[in-house]
Amino acid sequence: MEYLENRELSWIKFNKRVLEEATDPDTPLLERLSFSAIYQSNLDEFFMVRVGALTDREKTDNTQKDGKTGMTPSQQLDAVFTAVRRLQPSVEEAYKKTTDELIPYGFEHVTFDTATKDELTFLELYFKREIKPFISGIVVNDDLPFPFLKNKEIYAVVQLGAKKTTIGIVPVNHEQSERIIQLGNGGKRFILEEEVVLHFAHLMFKNYKVLDRALIRVTRNAYIMASGRGAEFRDRMEELVDKRKKLAAVRLEISDVFSRESLDYLCRKLKLKNVRVFTSRIPLDLSFLYTLQEYDSDPKLHYVPRSPRKPAVLSDTRPVFAQVKQKDILLSYPFESINLSFIRLLQECANDPKVTSIKITIYRLARNSKVVDALCTAAEQGKDVLVMIELRARFDEANNIEWSKQLQEAGVKVIYGPRDYKAHSKLLLITRKAQGGGYDYLTQIGTGNYNEKTSTLYTDLMLLTADREIAADAEDVFNGLLNGTFVDSPRKLLVSPLALRPQVLAMMDEQIEIARNGGKGYIGAKINSLNDMAIIEKLVEASQAGVKIELVIRGLCCLIAGVKGYTENITVRSIVGRFLEHSRIFIFGTDGPEQKIYIGSADFMSRNTIRRVEVAAPIEDEKLRKRIREMFRILMKDNVKARVMLSDGTYIHDRRTERQPLLSSQEYFYDEAYSKLEVKQNRQEQLKKNRESGAAKKKSSTARKAASSAKKPAAKRTRKKKDE
């Protein structure tokens, strides 16, 4: 269909938008370098997971076609490789342009051609003393075994003079190594370790003549499937995570033109076709660019410093649980602090003798997680603590395995969720003894992980509510996770895999009916990705019925907006900026009491709607509904970091007209958080002054009365006393 786009190609367009931030003149120079690194990191994961999965599919059933564009796995792979290759010149240009512009600030990526004589002498000595003793060269040919090349590690390869094709391989990294070799200016003048190893690689093969040399980096398949839920499941996951390190190569990156004979040999040993070889004339691994940010604090090179604010909606003097009993609370990250809200709640409840149980789903955690500390404290104090930890959270499997062990040692009951379904929900249920008998409940539903680090980098929302029906739904979710069953008829929550997509489609049908009857139907959604065909087809139907549809989709979007006869009433915009847009908002209906608003953990992807346990919660408090409506309006007005999809599937910056003031939604929300806290602090300060002033006036008045009384004649004072 002309309004559909292939998932993989749509994702590459998203990563292109990330790359655009690396060239945006409004982005500070060192921050531009970060976006270059993010682009590459995204692409690495894409090859490991998506290309890995397509490669597996190509081998097992290459007749299976993409349901949206009718492409076989082979055709999709060819299209992916072509799209990635076309972007490479832009990647190289972005890196070179930014590093050139950083030269006046003292930054310089030195090469052996630009190094001074003294630096060349230093580098030779450095190689011999600090690198060579810790690495070794391996000679390989058809008579010698080929070594295993680790995923994403850099190796120097050389063509060696011999009768048959022979190459030398030198692993660059070792435990004692420093990748950035500082040459001056506080490290801003530097060369990379792999470049030094490559230059002196001939010293590793003294019995051979080196004919050619290059750096290589292999990307391996990381797509693993696992099912299970019992105690043995963790052991199985540990085996799979270890096995993943040795999966087949899916891509070979090389630093320069290399001997065709030797390159063909490498491809043969790695079982890769030449189409999977990608040449790069900039560093093969750009992760070192994050470190460069620490070498210069010049504010012109960085974003304006921002830090999460203390939530203005929360009082410092009363427990969070007590405040939620009075009213629903909505928190917004990274603009508000997770430590001063959610972590505070957990810590208070862990030490509250009236709290009897804490139940939580965990997907990704920070390295030194305060969440785990609080849960362990709660268990050690005798509370019933249940943790559903997802061991299949991609690239966090090993971390979660270790966290599960630590939690169990503290007395926490740990479960792993349904056998064939990931639990991706962000759900917490706390039970507390109520005054006078019975229990009170606090339920938290969020759009992002309980991760202190990413909460400062990702935009997310979190609802805290004492609603008993929502608590009952949450209890059903946890019972299902414990028993391996699914919630099919929740009271208020949307819960996949059985009771999220049907409800979303039903609410879309309501808007279609309104539009067909002459009313104003409206659907708004902020999500990370869209590929669920049932939802896409319903959006098309809604557009054709005249429903106005506004979608804010950061990543891949398999629906093309603005296609005449199909999607002309649909707007798709993507916001890529300083923070990763991660919150999910669903809106059905125009402003008013009949409008339905939800926040939750699910994207409109089939993996979320029918193959995972996800939870979305209704926003029912009118103040919070108004706040989310305003948030969505600001997102739709963003004309700094927003790109709008055109009817051919391309994206352009939404610069609007020059007369309109520039508005960055992310900066707007941070300004708002700063402003709200300042207003609250000013109000508190004024109340304090008023109290102090009132106390002073009262004291002064009392003193005046006492002084006046003291001046009266004694007889009169006595007479007055008698009269009284």
Image: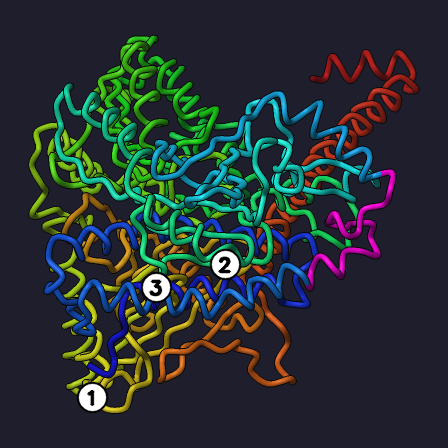
Magenta segment, which residues? 97-118
Mark 2 or mark 1, which is nearer the start of the sequence?
Answer: 2
Residue type at the position of mark 3? Leu
Asked whether the residues under the numbered discs 1 and 2 touch, taking CB atoms below 8 Å apart as contact, a structural biologist would say: no
Q: Nearer the viewer, mark 1 or mark 2?
A: 2
Residue 106 drawn in magenta: yes
Q: How would you rate the neighbour count of disc 2 (Cα within 10 Å): few for under 14, some for 14-19, many for 20 or more?
A: some
- Return the x and y of residue 335 as percentages of the image width and height: 54, 48
Q: Determine whether the residue tagged by mark 3 lies in a helix, strand or loop.
A: loop
Residue tagged by mark 3?
556
Above or below: residue 31 compared with residue 64: above
Mark 2 or mark 3, which is nearer the start of the sequence?
Answer: 2
* Distance from the alpha carbon under mark 3 to that under mark 2: 26 Å
Asked whether the residues under the numbered discs 1 and 3 touch, taking CB atoms below 8 Å apart as contact, a structural biologist would say: no
Q: How would you rate the neighbour count of disc 1 (Cα within 10 Å): few for under 14, some for 14-19, many for 20 or more?
A: few
Residue type at the position of mark 2? Thr
Residue tagged by mark 2?
279
Q: Nearer the viewer, residue 481 or 68?
A: 68
Mark 3 or mark 1, which is nearer the start of the sequence?
Answer: 1
